[in-house]
Structures are given as C-alpha cells and as structure tokens.
Amino acid sequence: MKRIIALITVASALVLTGCSQVGVAASVGSTKITQTTVQKSIDTVLAERAKVDTASMQLETGETLNRSQLRFHLISVLFGAIAKDAEITTTKAEIDSRRASIITQVGGESELPKALVGAGIASVDLDSYLDLIVVSEKLSQAMTTAGVDQNNIGVEIQKLVVAKADKLKVTVNPRYGKWDSAIGDVVAADAASSAATPATAP
C-alpha cells in the first residue's frame, strides 16, 4: 500500500486548465474521469469507515478526501498509458495473487476492510490499486534488466510519469481544487503556489 501512495505523489510537470465539461472531475488527454466515478470511491470509503473501528486512525475528510480519491484515478490513467506504451499487461491471476499476498500481510480476510479504510482505499478500487502495484513491479523489473541501478528505479519511473503527463495534459475540475504542476498533485484551490515553496524530495 505504501508503494502505491508513493506512486500517487510522484512529482510531475502537468499543465492545469479548467475542466468545463459537466460531470467531469478531471481528464487526462481524451480520457475523462467522471464526477460519478470519483464520488463512488468517496461514498464507498465513507460507508466502509462505519463498519470498522477507526479510533486510532488518521482519516482524510471533506475536500482532502475528495482530492485523494481523484488523485488515485488520475494516476491510474497515467500508469495505464505507460503500461500500454511499454507493452505491459496484467492478468487476473496476477491481481488475485497480489490480493492474496496483501490479505496475508494484514492478518487475514477479516482484517482487509480495516486495512483498506486505514489506507484510504475504496474496496471498489482495490483491483485497480493492485494493478498499479503489478505494473510498477514489471516496470522496475524491465529497468533492472536494462541495467538501471536499483537505487534509481523510482526516479526513472517518475520520469516516465512526467513524460506521459506532459504529452497527454491534465485538466481538473475546480470543485476538487487545482493541479499544481510544480509538485504534480491536486491541491486546494486556495493553496499557496508551490513555485514560492519548492517541493522537497520524499
């Protein structure tokens, strides 16, 4: 799960424009991410919180939750495009295997709902998260085979995301905030410009 969070927050240089289409939360090139899609993720996260003990969790709420769910869908589209270019595919068996591995890590099937709530992942999006993990691992393997130093894998994957994002361009509906091209993230509409506060390396 931490790996996906890292992927979601990679720095990139995207162009922000207004997203005027009714019902569109954001777009990546010609791909539209609808408000309905994002809202389904948000509603699922909120509904699942009511079913587990969240007393010890630090959970996103309000606009922060909205942005994080949109962020996931944006990165999913970008990684899908990268995987297509690299001729990387994932299978149901690979997704199922990764799911089984995570279930073991969290202590069993009964603990999965709580783990997802803690990670801010909607159960309806779990397979997509697992797909991102598998794609990132295959990209890493391909780079290692090509001679890229293990310590530079993350940087090289980030470069792929930046290049793809620059080519496709991103638009974000103002109701979710704005796209900050300096840090490659959806931020609050009234957030201070990151040009004045350079992002630090993770």
Image: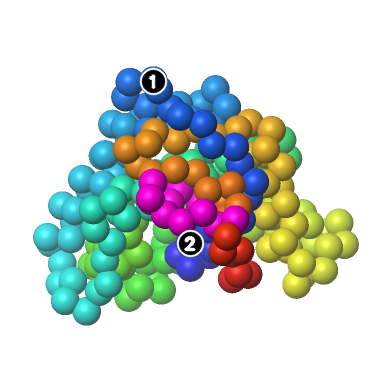
> What x and y, as percent, mark residue 190?
38, 50
- Work out whether 145 lies above or below 173: below
Numbered range of the magenta stretch: 185-195
Spatial separation of the CA atoms under disc 2 and disc 1: 28 Å
Assess whether residue 36 is covered by the magenta stretch. Answer: no
**Which residue extends farthest bottom?**
56
> What x and y, as percent, mark residue 96?
45, 52
Query: Residue, x 26% and y 39% (percent of image)?
Result: 39
- Work out whether 164 lies above or below 51: above
Residue placed most toward the observer, 145 or 164: 164
Q: What kind of residue is marked 2?
A: Ile
Query: Residue, x 59% and y 37% (percent of image)?
Result: 15
Residue of label 2 = 5
Residue placed most toward the observer, 63 or 141: 63
Q: Quarter of the image for the N terminus: give it.
A: bottom left
> What x and y, as percent, mark residue 173?
39, 33
Q: Is residue 89 visible to us here?
A: no
Residue placed most toward the observer, 140 or 180: 180
Point out which mark residue 21 bears. 1
> What x and y, as percent, mark residue 26?
43, 33
Residue placed most toward the observer, 69 or 166: 166
Q: Is residue 21 visible to us here?
A: yes
Point out which mark residue 48 bears. none
Query: Residue, x 67% and y 38% (percent of image)?
Result: 166
- Work out whether 72 lies above or below 166: below
Near mark 2 (Cα within 10 A), the count class, few <14, some 14-19 or many ≥20, is: some
Secondary structure beneath label 1 = loop
The picture quadrant where one finds residue 70 is top left
Mark nearer the viewer, 2 or 1: 1
Q: What kind of residue is marked 1?
A: Gln
Q: Quarter of the image for the C terminus: give it.
A: bottom right
